[in-house]
């Protein structure tokens, strides 16, 4: 394309090479074809489809390549969409304790990248349901910039038999072993293990599979970081999972200071009400806080959410306290 002057001068091949980690030859061909079709579409006039296309005007630009990269997703690449779905509200600063865990997990990613001695590092994030473990793990996966990042969650395996679930989990690990650097997020391990406190019951087959995979070293030259999340630490301890993870971090609920920080960023209260709202929250998981804010943002008669999120109105602290009563009761 370059020889025939079909490439625009802004195309940066180095950058494209960096952005196409883990693309196979066929997938790269797909990217090029897709970029060309974007460039051709620009030349077509919908008013007159019979109009001749000037060959000299056809230039594939960097933007065409970037659009093509959105369309052609590598089979063994990062599942960015799945990961982004774990942090739908984006990531707000939840205070120093959350930041510390993020920094430590990023250090583990760095360690797995550069170290010769530790090709496999496993890290467990435990904490109350809704405290932000999955969002944190997904953020580390995305920010690590590893070519292969996958999330294993029970929601993608609803209704499957345990042997099918095992096969899917093994496949994800086998795919990771083909990539030089990989991150696998094992979300809600107790759900993956089909844990049920009444009984108690769980799937021994999936449990044994995961225990083996968490200990199996990747092939030579390949490196893997596994981040697990759980709200059932005692159960995981009893089935021997906790010893399998190299490090465990406790993801806390929001202290008053943390909640104040989050509320300031959300900017839904009048400045003078932020303190009172944060005081009332009392060790709440971030998930519940978001739910509460959304409830309160509807206003007493409903319909005020748009004005509140656009900053034109603020949530009334009295109404917020009423909603808080309901949420705490739930
Ligand atoms: N730092 C953050 N900034 C913004 N939103 C966040 C943050 N952390 C978590 N959330 C949001 O809070 C909700 C719950 O988070 P998440 O699913 O990560 O919690 P969890 O601890 O994994 O919960 P569970 O144990 O129930 O799976 C999600 O909607 C997520 O988008």
Image (cartoon, grey):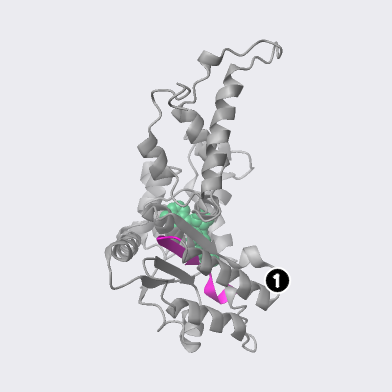
Asked whether 130 or 12 is in front, the reply is 12
Check residue 105 for magenta coloring.
no
What residue is pinned by disc 1?
Answer: 160
What range of the chain is rendered magenta?
179-191
Q: Residue 78 at x, y = what percent?
A: 49, 54
Q: Residue 311 at x, y = what percent?
A: 47, 35
Asked whether 74 or 6 is in front, the reply is 6
Q: Tell me: residue 195, above or below residue 76.
A: below
Inspect this view and state whether residue 131 appears.
no
Q: Residue at x 39, y 73 (%)?
A: 122
Asked whether 10 or 252 is in front, the reply is 10
Q: Residue 203 at x, y = what percent?
A: 62, 83
Inspect this view and state whether residue 81 appears.
yes
Check residue 182 for magenta coloring.
yes
Q: Tell me: residue 191, above or below residue 23.
A: below
Q: Tell me: residue 172, above or below residue 36.
A: below
- Secondary structure beneath dot 1 equals loop
Q: Residue at x 37, y 71 (%)?
A: 121
Q: Residue at x 40, y 84 (%)?
A: 243
Left or right: where 254 falls relative to 175:
left
Asked whether 235 or 42 is in front, the reply is 42
Q: How many marks?
A: 1
User: Where on the picture, by quarter, is residue 249?
Assistant: bottom left
Dot 1: within a 10 Å radius of its alpha carbon, few (fewer than 14), some, or many (20 or more) residues? few
Q: Residue at x 56, y 61 (%)?
A: 327
Q: Tell me: residue 197, above or below residue 320.
A: below
User: Where on the picture, by quarter, is residue 164?
Assistant: bottom right
Within 8 Å of ligand 1, the CB of disc 1? no
């Amino acid at each position: 394309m370059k020889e025939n002057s079909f490439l625009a001068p802004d195309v940066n091949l180095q950058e494209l090479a960096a952005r196409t980690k883990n693309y196979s030859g066929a997938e790269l061909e797909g990217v090029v074809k897709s970029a060309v079709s974007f460039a051709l579409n620009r030349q077509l006039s919908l008013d007159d489809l019979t109009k001749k296309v000037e060959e000299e005007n056809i230039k594939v630009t960097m933007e065409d390549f970037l659009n093509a990269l959105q369309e052609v997703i590598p089979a063994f690449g990062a599942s960015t969409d799945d990961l982004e779905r774990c942090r739908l509200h984006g990531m707000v600063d939840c205070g120093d304790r959350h930041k510390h865990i993020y920094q430590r997990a990023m250090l583990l990613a760095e360690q797995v990248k550069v170290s010769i001695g530790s090709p496999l590092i496993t890290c467990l994030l435990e904490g109350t349901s809704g405290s932000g473990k999955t969002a944190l793990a997904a953020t580390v996966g995305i920010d690590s910039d590893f070519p292969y990042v996958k999330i294993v969650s029970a929601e993608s395996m609803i209704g499957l038999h345990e042997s099918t679930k095992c096969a899917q989990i093994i496949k994800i690990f086998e795919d990771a072993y083909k990539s030089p650097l990989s991150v696998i997020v094992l979300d809600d391990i107790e759900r993956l293990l089909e844990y049920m406190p009444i009984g108690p019951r769980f799937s021994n087959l999936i449990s044994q599979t995961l225990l083996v995979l968490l200990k199996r070293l990747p092939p030579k030259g390949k490196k893997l970081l596994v981040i697990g999340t759980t709200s059932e630490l005692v159960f995981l301890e009893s089935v021997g999972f906790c010893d399998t993870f190299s490090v465990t971090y406790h993801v806390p609920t929001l202290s008053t200071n943390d909640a104040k920080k989050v509320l300031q960023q959300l900017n839904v209260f009048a400045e003078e009400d932020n303190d009172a709202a944060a005081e009332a929250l009392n060790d709440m998981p971030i998930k519940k806080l978001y739910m509460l804010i959304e409830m309160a943002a509807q206003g007493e008669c409903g319909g005020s959410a748009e004005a509140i999120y656009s900053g034109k109105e603020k949530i009334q602290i009295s109404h917020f306290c009423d909603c808080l009563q309901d949420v705490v009761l739930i």
